[in-house]
Image: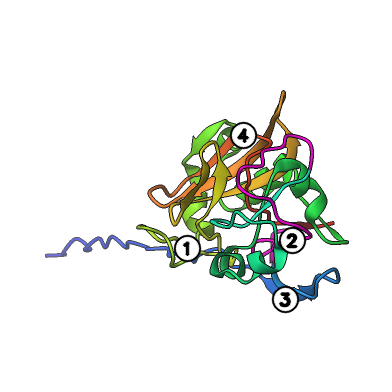
Amino acid sequence: MRRKPIGWIILLFIIIPPIQAQVSGEFMDQRDGRVYRWIEVGDQTWMAENLAYLPSVNPVSDALFDGECYYVYEYSGSNSNEAKSTPYYEKYGVLYNWTAANAACPDGWHLPEDKEWITFETYLGMTDNDSGKRGWRESGETGAKIKSVEGWYTDNGRDEVGFNALPGGCRGYGGYESKGYCAYFWTATPAGGDNGWRRGVCYDDDSSCREEDRRYFGCSVRCIKD
């Protein structure tokens, strides 16, 4: 008696590796001699550290929409050398109001437009439908992919491309806030009225936030190559 052939079900498990930055390097800001790491992500070249250019420093009580303001978290004096000697400055860099952020990047670099952030986010896996939405956008887990692997209150990130977003907090409505909990980055794109678009990632969420904030807020800056 002939036996029926035994059918085999073959299950294929495809492991998709994390996105990796293909090229990285360093450059020096000729204005103050500080050296920054950079990464290439897709067709873009991003700074892999927060900008720390500090031509002057403002106390937290200063809140300007149009004039330039530079803040160092928890520092409320006016001596830039003192501000640069603080642990926060060395680790997290400077918080800039929107006007200062638009003028702070070194030659050959610029503050990224909102659309350049969208290009970055969609490369990381965010859907086109989510990319232009206001608020928290969950597709692609872009927050988890750019957050540093340590330093967050809980839920450290995976830092899959070397962006190394650190929870440097901000200068917000009530002064300095959110260090250890959130990172905020200005874009160069105005949002109407006295607002500008920014990005945010926080300790308790794998997504990233696209929202407008008051231009006198102090946020971190990541420059992108021209």
**Which comes before the other along the chain, label 4 or label 1?**
1
N-terminal-most mark, 2 or 4: 2
Residue kind at label 3, given as amino acid type: Gly
Tell me the kind of residue under disc 2: Leu
Label 3: how many Cα within 10 Å (few below 14, some 14–19, many 20+): few
- From the viewer's side, name the closer residue of 202 and 63: 63
Q: Is residue 141 visible?
A: no
Magenta stretch in the rendered image: 39-67
Q: Residue furthest left?
A: 1
Residue 25 bears which disc, if any? 3
Of discs 2 and 3, which sits in the foreground?
2
Q: Is residue 165 left or right of residue 51?
A: left
Query: In the rendered structure, which amino acid carries the disc numbered 1?
Result: Ile
Distance (Cα) linking label 3 and label 4: 32 Å
Is the image coloured rainbow, by chain, by secondary structure, or in one colour?
A: rainbow
Under circle 1, the secondary element is: loop
- Closer mark to the observer between disc 1 and disc 3: 3
Observer-side mark, 4 or 1, equals 4
Sequence-first tag of 1 and 3: 1
Q: Is residue 213 visible?
A: yes
Across and down, in percent, residue 98 comes to 72, 42
- Which secondary structure, mark 2? loop
